[in-house]
Image (cartoon, grey):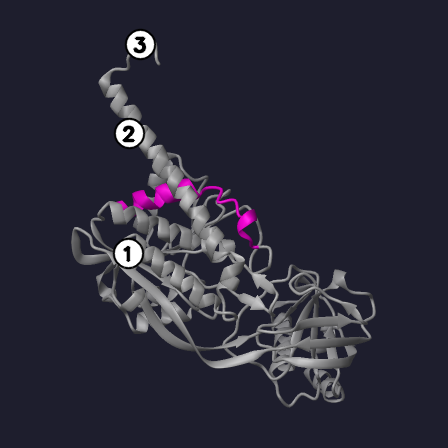
Amino acid sequence: MLAYPIPRILSVILFITIQQLNVVAQDITYARKVVNTLASEKMKGRGYVQDGNTLAANYISNEFKRWGLVSYNKNYFQSFITSVNTFPGNMDVRINSIQLRPGIDFLVNAESPGISGTFNTIQFKADELLNHVQFISKVQSTVNKFIVIEAYDKNKYNKEENKKIKDAIEYLKSNPKNPIAGTLLLTKDKLTWDASTVQYSKPSITIKTDSLSPNIENITLNIKSKFIKKFELQNVIGYVEGKHSDSLIVLTAHYDHLGMMGNKTMFPGANDNASGMAMLLNLASYYSKHQPEYTTVFIAFAGEELGLIGSNYFTEHPAVELKKIKFLINFDLAGTGDEGIQVVNGSIFKNRFDTLSKINEEHHLLPQVKIRGEACNSDHCTFYQKKVPCFFIYTLGGIQAYHDIYDRAETLPLTEFEDYFKLMMEFINML
């Protein structure tokens, strides 16, 4: 018990402050729960093996239902079809009989077909790829062998030369008339995976050079792939009715990631983009309890990693009138923030950017709000092309895990998530 009673007005202020702190605590707790769930082993990397994509979509639709969002379609789903190349089974690579570790020592490139067997190799230096005639001649004499492209420094070559090297490698991977068995791409860089809607005719594998002995005599592989021509995906869409429905605020994030490379190696995608989904669901929770000024639409996109497929489908088959969208904010990579945030389209919609920056300065929230021009690098792009005013925002600094097996929930700091959430809440309320 306190020695002296607190005046009633101070008691009220103290109560409100405590309640506000509790709201913030709940925000970060919920965010962590969302990231932990979406990046967990049971979600299988939210990709196209072992129902990862569907498991994630069902989780998000249940959260939309939990927060009372209204659905435009049954179960909040907007379904569509795409093709996808998958790796559902074996993922075994051996160099000179030495076993390599998937995701750590090597990646099977996303467009690759399956392959089994032992193959001899022949070395190519990057310079040999620059002379097209000699390159083709050497390839045509390389029957049923793996071509090994030695690691090279891109800074050593000019823009035109780098393009020639890239085109030559693409020829090796995709041309069915090649007599080669496949391609090994050696690299000193971090291994970064991808996803693909096509399957090439020849397998290609990227290997870290520090995983190898100097001489690669042969390679033994047992890799299973499956190309699916018609794979059903679904955007997850819900909304909160605002005081005004003549204009819409749209908040988006993609929930898909790369899934599984084989039946054991998972790409969790904690920062990319379970963190963006954590921001989206936190805002859905908030506005379900605090009616927004304008009807606010929440969209969780599928197929972003396959080439912005979900957002492209939405803009071609919109659940809302695109011309009614007052502003759209797309969240991707929301899990750090040590160096603030980057705002794509900030220089295009400068007045909006200035408002966002001013809020940040007045409330002393993030280290910086950094301006950037247009870039077609996430799900905002297709909306922007349809003349919808929009930002794509991502956090800066912190961990460097990206499109690899290390983008895990347990190492994602959510450094500035609370202040980022406050900034977005204030900004949205002023739109």
Q: Which mark is residue 4?
A: 3
Q: Left or right: where does residue 288 sit relative to residue 146?
A: left
Give amino acid for label 2.
Ile
Rate crowding at label 3 as few (under 14), some (14 to 19) or many (20 or more) other CA atoms within 10 Å: few
- Residue that label 1 marks: 327
- Which SS type dominates the magenta stretch? helix
Q: Dividing the picture into quarters, in which one does residue 235 lie? A: bottom left
Q: Position of residue 372 (x, y in %)?
A: 43, 53
For residue 379, say whether it is visible: no
Of mark 2 and mark 3, the one earlier in the sequence is 3
Disc 3 marks a residue whose amino acid type is Tyr
Spatial CA distance of label 1 from label 2 is 31 Å
Residue 16: mark: 2
Between label 1 and label 2, give the one nearer the viewer.
2
Quadrant in the picture for the N terminus: top left
Tell me, yes or no, whether the highlighted magenta stretch contains residue 276: no
- Residue at horizontal 23%, vertical 57%? 248
Q: Nearer the viewer, residue 290 or 209?
A: 290
Residue 423 is covered by the magenta coloring:
yes
Question: In percent of the image, x 50 and y 46: which residue is there?
Answer: 336
Secondary-structure class at tag 3: loop
Q: Which residues are magenta?
A: 407-431
Q: Are marks 3 and 1 in contact (CB under 8 Å)?
A: no
